[in-house]
Image (cartoon, rainbow, N blue to C red):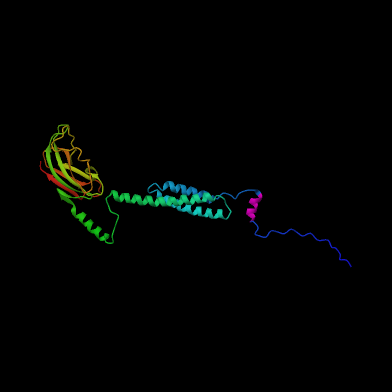
Amino acid sequence: MSEANFPQQPQSPMQPVGAQPSRQDQEYQDQGQRPPMTVTGVVGVVFGALGLVLSFIPIVNNLAAILGLVGAVLGVIAIVGTFRGKKHGKALAIVAVVLSVLAIIITLAMQSAASKAIDDAMGVSTSQTSGDSSSKKSDAKKTESKGEQDMEGDLKSMHVKIVSAVRSGNDYENNPTVLVTYEWTNNTKKNNSFAVLANPKVFQNGSSLDTAIYTDAPAGYDASSYLAEVQPGATATVTIGYVLKDDSAVTVDVTDFISMDDSTKVKHVFTL
């Protein structure tokens, strides 16, 4: 008996094995579109760029550090979103992080440089020891005890001596003058002039005298000495003429040019 031939049934095609694309990704593929641009990346770039610009401006760069920190966080969030395929703009997100980090670094560097520059300008060392508090108290007591120093003494940034005050030639209006000679030592850490550090005044009968202007320079007078700079630790002589009101005694008074308290001074009364 022959075997019956049965028609073969068609087999259904095999389905590919693997994870199916997400619904959101499938929609983008079906529509032929890219995922939307990362908004956090764009905002991060804006914050990072603003922070980078402001980081070069003293005081204002405190805000730059905050902008940089926020921009860096937004940039990291944007990078994570682009790696998951939900957003595009990976390069933009990386730029946001780089700009923000640079803003923070430059802000810290600028603030450190500004602080050092201020310390150098004031001639103050930034190094301190554990015994600074006690030494500051003793230094303060010494400063307070200086008060008025007769003829010679120390000010905050210089040592000064009032050498002499003598009658001199008449000024350009033929008024009598007194020529005062000062000797001073630069105690700061950079080149400075007597005009920058000192505030010299001469009084007669309680009123300050005007500075004399000479047509013919009298003996011993050096017009450039007042503005001449000297190096740290160097000593120089300065001569300044003042217009007299009468023949009474004059009081020469020297204080720091910038000082909240004029109690520390070098002073002397000269009889003409």
Front residue (pair 108, 210): 108
Magenta span includes 27: yes
Give the percent coordinates (x, y) of residue 18. Answer: 66, 60
Horizontal side of 45 relative to 266 (left or right) equals right
Front residue (pair 71, 20): 20
Residue at the limit of the structure toward the bottom, as seen here: 1
Q: Quadrant of the C terminus?
A: top left
Tell me which segment is drawn in magenta: 22-30
Q: Main secondary structure of the magenta part?
A: helix
Residue found at x 42% / y 47%: 54
Q: Quadrant of the N terminus?
A: bottom right
Magenta span includes 205: no
Give the percent coordinates (x, y) of residue 185. Answer: 19, 47
Front residue (pair 71, 151): 71
Q: Is residue 4 above or below residue 93?
A: below
Q: Is residue 174 above or below residue 121?
A: above
Give the percent coordinates (x, y) of residue 124. Answer: 27, 52
Give the percent coordinates (x, y) of residue 70. Answer: 47, 53
Quarter of the image for residue 132 reads: bottom left
Horizontal side of 120 relative to 164 (left or right) equals right
Residue at the limit of the structure toward the right, as seen here: 1
